[in-house]
Amino acid sequence: MPRIDRYILGQLLTLFGFFALVLVSVYWINRAVSLFDDLLNDGQTALVVLEFTALTLPLVISVVLPVAAFAATAYGTNRLAGESELVAMQSAGLGPWRLARPVLVFGVFVGVMVAVLVHGLVPMARARLSDRSAEIAENVTAQFLRPGSFQYPVRGVTLFIRDVAGDGRLLDLFIEDARDPAAQVTYTAQEALVVRAEAGPVLVLLEGLSQTLRPGDGTPSLEVTRFAEFSYDMAGMFAGEGDRGRDLRDYGTPTLLAAPPALLKATGASAGDARREAHERLAQPLLSPVAAMLGFATLMIGGFSRFGVWRQVGWAVLGLIGVQFLSNAAANQVGRDADLWPLLYLPALLGAALCAGLLWLAARPRGPKGGAR
């Protein structure tokens, strides 16, 4: 690689590292604060909070990297123009197309980083996060069953436990289930055990009493049943409806493209939905070179000015917003009809065409406006 390309690429990579660090920190802290509140309120330890925030980091980085690439290119080009380095390069015979080569290399490098994240690290992190969330959701004793206070896990259910023994037994338990107005049930038990089942946690009540109140038509009735052992299903209460399937985003891209029956059964999605998710991942890295080239090409159409090229920076930002808007619109359209997945690649193609057009304008000869007289 020529020295001038290494110089420009080094400048861009340095600025990219700075902007990526700042943007990732802002996004990550914003997400970590909400996770911190939710997990600590559920009685989790600081290590669990740290694990969950770390698992969200790959997704945050994949979203931030294209924006950081655009910011680095726009700022770097503006600085080269402000310090007259860009003018010197052009005076030496380097045209816009030639100067765009290291920028394109930089954009491809960022695109490869995004591809590694969206195809590898993000699905792995999401799958691990889903498994850990399920484990914590099933750990009812640690999450919801707090002794000495009334709990309201879902609307219409009241839960009270006097104490939790050292071996995990729940002592003197009270449950009022009023979710069905036609049959309000109250359970009391001397002891209870939390047992894991395939559908989720099950509460086994020992030596207790069940009272069912049926309002009826003006003549309420009360049914009382004593039991030595009774199973109370808590899957829908604590695990978020026990039949909830996995998310397509938890699986690798090759698996989504193949769309095996096991995947469709686990997620409840169609084969078209799985392929749509895969093509979204394939199209996402393509926006990184477009963002980098857009920040460079837009600034190249402006001439030298002692006041910089901030007007062109504004146009570059509008161009990036337009490409992102097209990307969101394409994703929404494909979400309605999975057979339209080729639309996911359209924003990157239009962005590349826009960059080529801007470079063509920048490469046009700029003579005096008036002809010779």
Image: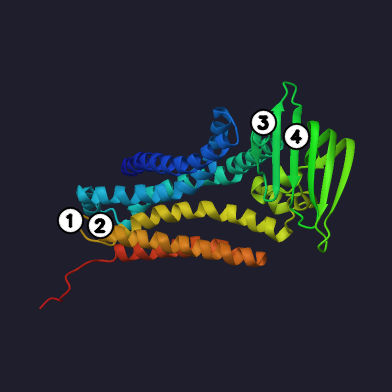
Q: Are marks 2 and 1 in contact (CB under 8 Å)?
A: yes
Mark 4: amino acid: Leu
Q: Residue shown at 63%/55% (left/top)?
A: 277
Q: Are marks 3 and 1 in contact (CB under 8 Å)?
A: no
Q: Residue shown at 41%/46% (left/top)?
A: 106
For the residue pair 86 and 94, the one nearer the viewer reads as 86
For disc 3, the neighbor class at 10 Å (few under 14, some 14 to 19, many from 20) is some
Helix, strand or loop at disc 4? strand
Of discs 1 and 4, which sits in the foreground? 4
Vertical order, 143 against 269 (above or below): above
Mark 3: amino acid: Pro
Give me the disc on residue 307.
1
Quarter of the view holding residue 365: bottom left
- The CA distance from mark 2 to mark 4 is 68 Å
Give me the disc on residue 173.
4
Quarter of the view holding residue 339: bottom right
Q: Report the residue marked by disc 2.
A: 310
Q: Left or right of 211: which side holds 165?
A: left
